[in-house]
Amino acid sequence: MVMARQDWKEPLYGLWERYALVFVIILFVIVYWFYKSVIVPLFRSRVPYFAYTDTKGATIGNDKALELATLLYNAMKDVGTNDSIVNYVYDSIGGNHANYRLIFNSFGVKPYAYFGAPAFSWQDSDFLSLIEWLERELSDSDFKKWVAFTT
């Protein structure tokens, strides 16, 4: 009795395993790319969904607004708040609602960790707007000055 050889199946089987591994790696790369380029930016939006569109009458430009927003962020991001810088920015606004709106839009939404330092990733923090940062960082009397700009 003659038995048929079955060794021709082995190379083909090993080849399909390699193709499956390559396919899984390519699928993983595609899913990871989609996650990093589409999903994460949705959570890291730089402009709050309720950004102000009416900034007519502002006496500062976009560059100055970005500079003041950065000053505010740097004053509040670490443990403790530098009240003198927050008061400097408040004085720079000069009571102009349009100036506040420009600074608010430039500040955008930033991750806030409740223990006083910036969050390390978007999973362990909330993304808050400028007014929400100020609410958590300032005393009630100081915060009431800023709330006047939101109306």
Image (cartoon, grey):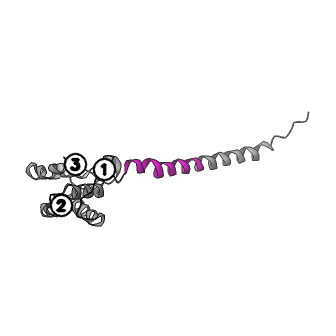
Look at mark 1 in the image and give the residue it sits on: 51
Look at mark 2 in the image and give the residue it sits on: 93
| Mark 3 or mark 2: whose residue is earlier in sequence | 2
**SS type, badge 1:** loop
The alpha-carbon separation of the residues under discs 1 and 2 comes to 18 Å
Is mark 3 in CB contact (under 8 Å) with mark 2? no
Front residue of 96 and 5: 96
| Mark 1 or mark 3: whose residue is earlier in sequence | 1
**Was residue 31 drawn as part of the magenta stretch in this picture?**
yes
Which residues lie in the magenta part? 26-55
- Assign the N terminus to one quadrant of the image: top right
Residue shown at 14% from the left, 64% from the top? 88
Provide residue 114's location: percent of width, then percent of height.
22, 49
For residue 77, say whether it is visible. Answer: no
Q: Residues within 10 Å of mark 2 (few under 14, many from 20)?
A: many
Q: Is 149 on the left-hand or right-hand side of 54?
A: left
Provide residue 118's location: percent of width, then percent of height.
27, 55
